[in-house]
Amino acid sequence: MKPKAYLFFIILSFSYFLGSSDNHAQSTNLWADSSSQKKNYVMEIWDNSNGLPQNAVFALEKDEFGYIWVSTEEGLVRLDGISSKVFDRESYPIMQEQTYFTFFNTKRGIWASGDRSIAFLNKSILKVIDCSSITENSSIRAVFEDTNGNLLIGNSKGEIYRFENEQFVPLEFWKPEVDLEIQSFFQLSPSELLVGTTNGLYKLNLENNTTAEIAPSSFSAMKVFGNSNLPYVFSPQEGIFKINQELQLEEIVPIDGIQDMIHFSLTLDEENRIWGSSSEKGLMIIDNGEVTRFYYPELNNYTVRGIIKDETNLYLGTLGKGLAIVKPAKVKQPKFDELQKKNIKALIQGNDSSIWVGTQSDGLFRVVGDEIQSWRQEDGLLTNGVTTLATKEGKAYIGSSAGVSILDIRSGKFTSYFTQENGLKNNYVQTVFKDSKNTIWILTRNGGLHYIVENGTIQEVDLPAEFKRTRFVSILESSNGDMIIGSMSKGMFRIRDGVFVENQPLPLTPGENIIYCIHEDKDGNLFFGTHGGLIMLRDGQFKSLKKQNGLQTQAVYSITDDGKNGYWITNNFGAQFFSYQEFNLFKESTDDSFFIGSTLYDQSVGMPNSEANGLIFPAVARDFKGRIWVPTVEGVGIIDPSLQSGMEKEEIDFQWDELQYGDKKETINEEITIPAGIRMFQVSFSLIDFKNPSQYSVFYLIESKSDNWLPLKDQRFLYFNGLKPGNYNLKVKILRYGQQEAIYSLPIRVSASFFETLFFKISLGLALILLIYLALNFYLSKKLKVQLEAKVSKRTLELSHTNEKLKEAVKEIEKQKEVLHELTWNQSHLLRAPLSKAIGINQLLLNYSKYQKVEKSKEELEQELLSSLKQVDEILKDTFTKSENLKKS
């Protein structure tokens, strides 16, 4: 839209606001046009609940990298569009103050000024200068940096100092004739500087060291702003003036119309319009001297102190509400108030391009061009709750919990109904669908699978007894003409020519087994949106895409191929987009941990509510222009997929940010080196985008350790623990709308401590070998000594034992000698008597005839001889026994 037309619309909107007691945000919408849809804005709030330390914003500035810097009472904040980084005295002790009130942008970075110090910001806080020596009983009001990096600092006492060689030196040619306070510096050229004060406007020539008065001391120049080609000055007593090339003041707006202007907020946008805020209410735009006021209802009670307006977004720093970012909605909404804040159910487009909209409790609507029609229960609807819609030959079929209402579209009258009384198995109708043969199918609870035959009556599909009470939910006509039916708890049904063919359960748990929708791709693969994720059936095999694989939620309410870029599914978090490239990776992947890249369209980009509706049919409508209409609990969101491929892609603004280990923080440049002994460290990065940060999917890997890209979601830092010394390459892959855009690399060198160096390891190895040699040598020597000592001890012991045995042998010999002596004595004494007797008797017997006086007979003598011989024999036996015992001993 051209600037003048744009401004004209704002003026009209503001006039409408003045004349109406019903103040809608749309009436003052900065991004609105006269088309059939409102170009709604979305407002993103950053406050102490999601990134700011405190809700009072004193200043805003955008740096060369694209970061938005915010100053608050509790520190500085750097935003990249999706995450915030807080700089306060606790986390950055280099800061001398917690609160900095003003930003001054230079070519090298941003200077933030507090009461007693200034801080240089470039990705991080790089330097802080203590200014207490020049701010006694005063405060810093302005900072300027020349092309050589030298600083000028002005204070509230009207003094200007140079800061050179770490010293403050008064500016020798700045000698105002009146008391004044410095308010602002503004660079006209590399050597010329405007100085706004409470008493006059001055020009400094830093090359010639001269001062010139531009406006007299009666003129209070509270802020000089704009650009070098178009500078402006604001005076709270006079108004806003343009400073022309001759350095003369030309009045743009007198103070009468802008007495409530907050001069801190004044800024010039890219279209050379002046923006400012009111101390009473709202904002002002000044274009060619015309002042337009407007406000955002969300900021009704909050003063805006800082403003940045870029090509697409408006950044508003408030006192109490934090930072508000106003941007045009990517998801549009119908212009009709009748559909605002309604709980939208089924949607469908008729053959005449009209859009039919069912609601939960507000009846039925039909959008035809710039008009909208409606029907409620009092108009003939069975009930105001609509669950499903279909159209056929001038009739609309509206399903509900009370049956099907049939509307004659031309007359707008209801002509007939289908309920249990005339053929339905149950009055709760889940789905009404028209197939390619122009047949209307009606799916209900309690096993109701019906279609309407030519005579207008209902025909029920005969099902096996086990499915007589099945709740049917969704339907698809496949490429071969089969009707694929989704159910609750019973899986998928296939109907061919009105006859049941098969039932196929899905690999889901009982709580997940709801088929909300069915889709068939060009290859004939079936996809089921269920309460347990997205299930693909290909070649008889099931494959799942679940929350852990990249879905926002387990529930998938609809699946839509936009025909240009990829697939859209709806769920409780909005609409999720997958490019064809990513979707094909899912289909071909064999990795259960596969993570799909996607883009989420939710309330942050214009959806009336992030929660889309499900368990309705159809759960989305794709119109003839390719736009996707999404029903939510608070209205209809309209997504135009062609905008993704049609818009010019901007360069990705990726920045390596900071290395942190222990209590140290270092800005990352081209590579990082981890000091020896450090094993835990953190690397952060930024993906700067304030337009649509949700368009990105981010993955990373550590080259040389893994080939798998791991998802990061909204995380913008990586934590490492235990990386061994060596060289690594950290890679971050960026996908935009599911398409790979760029890969960024960061070399990481993990330094080894002395104990981890190769020299130490070699030295340790040699020392270990020497130690082993010495130990082995010592061991062998000691072992030999021990063995020798053992042999000597053993031999000594053996000799000792032998000596003992010899002693015992001698004793035994002595003992045997005594026994032998005793035997000898016994033989010589005991044996002598009986032997002598036997010999004598034997002689007597031999000469018996010679002896006449023998008193005994011969027989008696023989008996005595035998007795003596026995006695001798016993003595001999006893002696033999004792001698044997002597041998044994």
Image (cartoon, rainbow, N blue to C red):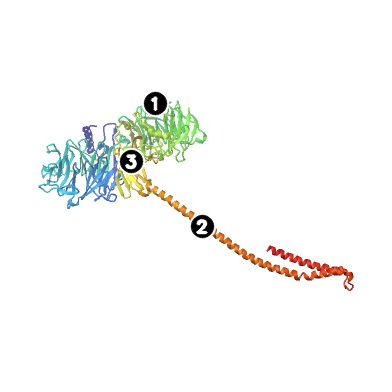
Q: Say which label, 3 or 1, has the lower sequence index.
A: 1
Select label 1 or label 2 by which is in front.
2
Q: Nearer the viewer, mark 2 or mark 3?
A: 2
Q: In the image, what residue type sits under mark 2?
A: Val
In the figure, 34 relative to 78: above or below? above
Q: Which residue is mark 1?
A: 393
Amino acid type at image mark 3: Leu
Residue 744, percent across and down? 33, 38
In the displayed structure, 547 sits above or below 792; it is: above
At label 1, counting other C-alpha atoms closer than 10 Å, the crowd grade (few under 14, some 14-19, many 20 or more) is few
Instruction: Kindly indicate the quadrant of the structure image that contains residue 354.
Output: top left
From the image, tell me which residue sits under label 2.
Answer: 786
Instruction: Point out the image quarter for the C terminus.
Output: bottom right
Residue occupied by mark 3: 746
* Separation of residues labelled 2 and 3 (CA atoms): 64 Å
Q: Secondary structure at mark 3?
A: strand
* Left or right relative to 476: residue 327: left
Residue 253 in sight in this render:
no
Q: Around disc 3, counting alpha carbons within 10 Å, would you say few (fewer than 14), some (14 to 19), or many (20 or more)?
A: some
Residue 237, percent from left and from top: 14, 43
Label 1 is placed on what type of residue? Glu
Q: Quadrant of the N terminus?
A: top left
x and y percentages locating residue 218 in the rendered image: 11, 45
Nearest the viewer among 774 and 256 is 774
Query: Between 834 and 9, which is closer to the camera in this rendering?
Result: 834
Q: Are marks 1 and 2 in contact (CB under 8 Å)?
A: no
Instruction: Pick the residue in front: 64 or 787.
Output: 787
Q: Quadrant of residue 694?
A: top left
Residue 202 visible? The answer is yes
Position of 747 with respect to 304 (left or right) is right
